[in-house]
Amino acid sequence: LVRTGSRDRRASRSMILLLLGLAAALGRWLLGKRQELDENGKPLHPIEKLEHAPNNYELASSISFILPVVEWFNRLEDRPAFAWLLKAKDMAEWYTPDVPLGWIFRLLNKADHLLWACTGMRIVNMDRSGFLAKCKVLEKPKYKQCEDDPSAEGFRLMLDACDDEHISATGRMMLNQLMNGWLDTRVAIDNYCHSHPEVLDVPIKRPIIIIGCPRTASTFMHKLLAQDPNLRKPHFWELAIPSPPPDPATYDSDPRRNLVATGFKSFDAISPHFYTDVHKHHYFGVDEIEEDSVLVHYAGVLAMHGIAFRGDSPYLAWQRRTDNKEAAYRVHKKVLQILSLRYRQPVQWLLKAPTIHSCFLEQMLKVYPDACLVVTHRRPVEVLPSWCKFVLSPMCSTLWRHGVKQRFLSTKSREQLELFERIERTIAKVRATRFGAQMFDVGYEELMANPMDVVRRCYAHFDLALTEPARESMERFIAGRGTGHQNKKFGKVSTQQHADFLDHAGLDLDDVSERLRLAALPPADSAAAPGARAGTEARAGARKPNGAAAATGRAEGA
C-alpha cells in the first residue's frame, strides 16, 4: 500500500473496508443462528430480551434519513408554481384528499388500491409473519396477566382488521409501526417487572379517574384538577415509553422526551398538516398531560385507532366484549407502578380515558377498587355531533382511502351512538352497586359557570385536601393566565348546527336524546345506590336547555 500510487491506495482501503463489512455481516448472521433458549428449551424471540420500551411513534425509523426529503417534496404542493404539475388542487377530483396527506402518499394510496383491485396484491403489506411470531410470545405463561389473558388474540384480530379494503397503504404503514411498537412495549413492561419484582409492590391508591361520555368537558376537568401539584399526571412521552422508570430529579431532561418528539416529526413527512388539523379537536404534545388509553393498547385494546376499522369486524366484536378486559387493566396498573417506582409513596394518580374506562368500568374496578370516579355529563345534542366530527377527523381518516370518509359518515355516527349507550348503561349499572358512593357527578353547565365550586365539592366528596398552592394554580388556570394551548378559545357551534349534522348523518335528535336517556336509567333489577339520585340530577341538569347555552351551544372543543 505504501509503494503504490494514491489511487491504488484508495482502492485498496475501499476493498479492506468492504471485506471488513462482509465479515461483520457474516458474524452477525452466525450469531443470529445461535438462538438462546427459554426455560422450556424453546428459542427466545428477540423481543423477550427487551426491558426498555421502544419509541412507538418514530415512524419508519430505519429509513428516517429520507423523511426530510419526502417532507420537502410534499411541501411543493403548497407552491403555486407546482400546483399544475401535481394536479393537487382543481384538476382531478380523485386527487383532492379528504385527509391531509402529502401528495406523494396520496399517489401511493391510489396506486396501491389500483394494484389490489386488478391483481389482489398490494404495494404496502403488513408484516404478518413477524407480528404473529410476536403474538406467540404473549401466549407464554411469563407474559400472561391472568389465566385467560386474551391479549394475543386481540392483536391477531387487529392484524386481520388492517387488511380491510378501506385501509390505505399509508394507513397500513402507520398501523404496522404502531402495532409492533405496542406489542414490543407490552413485552418490555413484563420483562422489566420480572427483572425488578419490587415494582409489583408499589401501591396505586385511590386514583382519580374521569369517566363519562367523551366531549363532556372531561378534558377541561382533567387539566383543571391537574393543576394540583399533589396529583401525579401522566405525560405523553412517559406513556409512550414507560420503562425504565422516570426519575423525578431528571424528569424534565429525560432523553425519551426528545425521542418521542423526533417520532412526531416523522409524521410530518406523511401528512404536513396532520397535527394542525387534529389539534382543532384534541391537542396533544410530548410534554402535555395525556389520556392513559394507550396503556390498554399494550394489551390489544384500542380506543381511537379501533374506530378506523369496520364496525362489523371481528376485532371490534372482540374489543367490545366486557368479560375479558381485566388483563388489560393489569397491564395498565403495571405501567403506573413502573412510572411511580422512583416517586415518594404513595402516589395518587389523575387519569382520564372516557371511551375506554367508561365501557369497561366493572373490570377496571377489579384492579382499582378504591378509585375516585368523576363522572362528567353534557346535553346529547352537543356531545354526539362533536364526537362524531372528532371520529371523522384526521385522527382516524388518515388511515382510510380517499372517499371512505363520506361513505362512513352515517355508519360511524350510528356506531358512536351505540358507544354512548354502552357508556351510559355501564355507568348506570355500576352506580347501582356499592361503587355508586365512589362517584362524583359533574354537569357541564355548572362546571363552565363555577369551576372552583365544582372542584371544592369534588375534593370534599372524596375527602381530599385542597391545598392553597393547588387552589391558586387552579384559579390561574381558570383566569386564562396559563401558558400554551390550555386556554385556547374555540368557536361556538349552535344547537341548530349540531342538529343539522345529526340529520346529515341520518340520526334524529329526539331519538338520540331518548335512547341516551333510557340507557342512563338504573337497571330494573337493582336497588338505587347512594350516588344514584345525585347522578340522575346531574344528568338531568346536563340535558336541560339553559338560556343562551341552548341557543348558541358551548365551545366545540371544551
Image (spheres, rainbow, N blue to C red):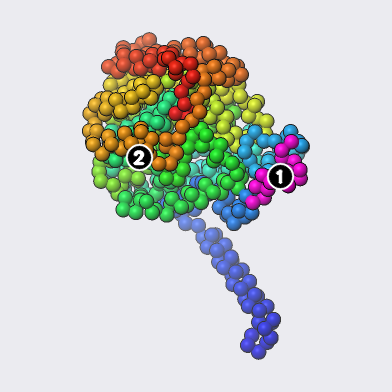
Q: Amino acid at mark 2?
A: Lys
43 with respect to 10 (left or right): left
Percent position of residue 206, x then y: 28, 33
Helix, strand or loop at label 2? It is loop
Q: Does residue 74 show up magenta in the picture?
A: yes
- Using the image as rendered, state which of residue 85 and residue 299 is in the foreground: 85
Assess whether mark 2 and mark 1 are in contact (beta carbons under 8 angstroms): no
Sooner in the amino-acid sequence: mark 1 or mark 2: 1
Tell me, for residue 80, which label it has, or none.
Answer: 1
130 with respect to 97 (left or right): left
Quadrant, the C terminus? top left
Q: In the image, which residues are magenta?
A: 72-90
Residue visible at 57% across and 16% down? 507
Tell me, for residue 233, which label it has, or none.
Answer: 2
Helix, strand or loop at label 1? It is helix
Q: Is residue 351 visible?
A: no
Q: Main secondary structure of the magenta part?
A: helix
Above or below for 55 versus 410: below
Which picture quadrant has residue 336? top left
Q: Amino acid at mark 1?
A: Pro
